[in-house]
């Protein structure tokens, strides 16, 4: 599984690997539109990345424990100090963002406040004029009662801005989601490659020719094959990989061809061709010698 969005975008852009997003929200656990990281790779995709040298397989739990427990005292202190620094910076950034939002809101309301103040002054002036006409003898007393608020209340001094400080109890505490920085980055010794299904030669064959692939369960096949990024293209083939000597029912070809044509796709069947007289092929999972056949139902 991949948790880093940079790694996910890099594999998609540089190596035609899409994977499947499986992260979900507690409030929407069954709605695919809300799925996000982590990204789960098919065994075929992991095997292909290992073969082309873009990745290597490690035991995540063992690697993490070995790296963390192997840190020295100086490295441990440096790591804690770096996490504390990140927490202070995150807290200051959050406080600054809150201050900016408050200032923006006050700026938007400044015009409304000014208009309300002027309307209040005009209303008070009208009341003063009406009172002066009704009570000509007590004009001075009445005008003193309806004096404007600006002449009665003293102007409040402008608030001074104190320097932005972060209290220890307000500091953010960072929980790192990855542990690649303090761990050694040298690749381990090559181990046995990931186990893959018998359809892997067809997957490797199509991938080597620039196709994108995703799980094909929704269309009753093994892979949905795209000529480009699935965000830009619809799938063109419904692919099924078989062994070269596997027996299959002819109705599978008929049904696959009808299904593919019905959804505007081709039904593609492929497998690795065995050489004459060969009993065991050590490169059974390689893309060499793969032959593929596309089937369409012309009567629909």
Image: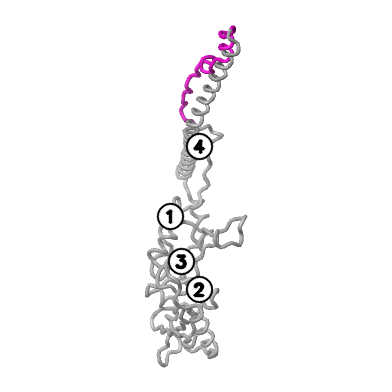
Q: Specify the label residue 98 is tagged with.
A: 4
Residue 108 percent coordinates (x, y) = 48, 35
Disc number lying in front (4 or 1): 4
Quadrant position of residue 209:
bottom left
Q: Sequence order check: which comes first, mark 3 or mark 1?
A: 3
Vertical relation: 205 (above or below) 163: below
Disc number lying in front (2 or 3): 3
Q: Specify the label residue 85 is tagged with.
A: none
Vertical relation: 140 (above or below) 209: above
Disc number lying in front (2 or 4): 4
Q: Sequence order check: which comes first, mark 4 or mark 3?
A: 3
Give the crowd class for mark 2: few <14, some 14-19, many >=20 residues within 10 Å: few
Q: Sequence order check: which comes first, mark 2 or mark 4?
A: 4
Residue 264 percent coordinates (x, y) = 47, 78
Give the crowd class for mark 1: few <14, some 14-19, many >=20 residues within 10 Å: few
Residue 17 percent coordinates (x, y) = 43, 67
Q: Sequence order check: which comes first, mark 2 or mark 3?
A: 3
Q: Are marks 2 and 4 in contact (CB under 8 Å)?
A: no
Task: Please name the residue that numbered disc 2 is placed on.
Answer: 195
Between marks 2 and 4, how big is the CA–CA gap?
A: 51 Å
Q: Specify the label residue 184 is tagged with.
A: 1
Residue 32 or residue 110, whichever sits in front: 110
């Amino acid at each position: 599984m991949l948790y880093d969005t940079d790694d996910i975008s890099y594999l998609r852009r540089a190596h035609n690997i899409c994977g499947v997003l499986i992260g979900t929200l507690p409030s929407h656990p069954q709605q695919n539109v809300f799925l996000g990281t982590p990204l789960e790779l098919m065994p075929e995709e992991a095997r292909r990345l290992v073969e082309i040298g873009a990745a290597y397989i490690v035991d995540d739990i063992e690697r993490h424990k070995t790296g963390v427990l192997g840190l020295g005292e100086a490295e441990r202190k440096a790591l804690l100090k770096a996490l504390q620094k990140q927490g202070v910076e995150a807290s200051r950034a959050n406080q600054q963002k809150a201050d900016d939002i408050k200032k923006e809101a006050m700026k938007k309301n400044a015009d409304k406040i000014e208009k309300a103040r002027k309307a209040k002054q005009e209303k008070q002036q009208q009341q003063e004029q009406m009172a002066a006409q009704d009570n000509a003898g007590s004009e001075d007393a009445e005008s003193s009662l309806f004096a404007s608020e600006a002449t009665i209340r003293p102007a409040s001094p402008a608030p001074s801005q104190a320097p932005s400080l972060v209290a220890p109890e307000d500091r953010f505490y960072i929980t790192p989601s990855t542990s690649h920085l303090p761990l050694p980055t040298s690749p381990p010794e090559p181990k046995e490659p990931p186990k893959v299904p018998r359809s892997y030669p067809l997957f490797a064959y199509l991938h080597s020719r620039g196709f994108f692939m995703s799980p094909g369960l929704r269309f009753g096949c093994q892979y949905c094959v795209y000529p480009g990024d699935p965000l830009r293209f619809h799938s063109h083939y419904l692919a099924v990989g078989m062994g070269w000597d596997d027996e299959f029912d002819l109705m599978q070809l008929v049904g696959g061809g009808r299904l593919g044509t019905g959804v505007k796709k081709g039904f593609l069947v492929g497998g690795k061709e065995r050489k004459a007289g060969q009993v065991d092929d050590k490169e059974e999972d390689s893309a060499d010698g793969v032959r593929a056949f596309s089937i369409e139902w012309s009567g629909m």
